[in-house]
Image (cartoon, grey):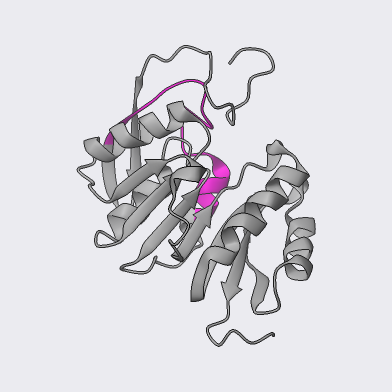
Amino acid sequence: MPTGEHYFTSSPGSDPTPRPLTVSLAGRTLELSTVGGIFSPDRIDSGTQVLLRNTPAPPPGGDLLDLGCGWGPIALTLALESPHARVWAVDVNQRALDVVRRNADAAGLENVNAVLPGDVPDDVAFTTIWSNPPIRVGKDELHNLMTGWLPRLEPGADAWLVVQRNLGSDSLQRWLATTLPGHFTTTRAATAKGYRVLRVRRRADGLEA
């Protein structure tokens, strides 16, 4: 990746040549592809592995969100486990979105929409959000992501976020608990390999905790 370029760059300048990637997701072995200039292009990163191993099965229907999808391991898992749901794979990196589309096709999945953040209709509410959020975008941008997307959970729905402990998982948990409206709760659901899985729940009754 060129100096100064990050995986959250909209149009990476690094080599766009696809290369094969074999992974196991939702109990299936998939022959996918990846490319440079996106997050963790050569494997399922440790944080995503922790999230996938420590999060309950997604809802069977509705709109499901993978926020910061990269090449798609979370979005593809959601689509495999909830074939009747509509999965939104959201990223600012156009190359990553292209790879997700190719990988969804390779896996025979027709329920994945890989789109830029602004392409998700404003009236879509989510039955779950799974995310390995891009911590390195900076605190202000990360906070904007959280306050922009988490309130779009349906009542009674959960978001599951994986954050490395030494990159601020505990401070993010405290910030979410004090910043989101009172009908949201934020708890630590799991700890593994230096990561925390945070659960953000929107109360079904709309009342403050």
- Please determine whether, in this image, residue 86 is positioned above or below residue 186: above
Residue range corresponding to the magenta coloring: 31-51
The percent position of residue 123, horizontal first and vertical second, equals 44, 62
Q: Residue at x 41, y 43 (%)?
A: 73
Asked if residue 41 shows in the view, the reply is: yes
As drawn, the residue found furthest toward the front would be 122
Task: Return the residue nearer the eye: 52 or 172.
Answer: 172
Name the side, left or right, on which 11 lies relative to 18: right
The percent position of residue 181, horizontal first and vertical second, equals 70, 73
As drawn, the residue found furthest toward the left would be 108
| Residue 47 covered by magenta stretch | yes
Task: Return the residue nearer the eye: 12 or 174.
Answer: 12
Q: Which quadrant does the N terminus fall into?
A: top right
Task: Return the residue nearer the eye: 205 or 134.
Answer: 205
Asked if residue 196 shows in the view, the reply is: no
Q: Which quadrant does the C terminus fall into?
A: bottom right
Q: Residue at x 67, y 70 (%)?
A: 186
Q: Residue at x 42, y 41 (%)?
A: 115
The percent position of residue 98, horizontal first and vertical second, equals 37, 30
Task: Return the residue nearer the eye: 207 or 6.
Answer: 207
The percent position of residue 154, horizontal first and vertical second, equals 48, 72
Q: Residue at x 52, y 83 (%)?
A: 204
- Please determine whether, in this image, residue 151 is positioned above or below residue 89: below
In terms of image quadrants, where is residue 173?
A: bottom right
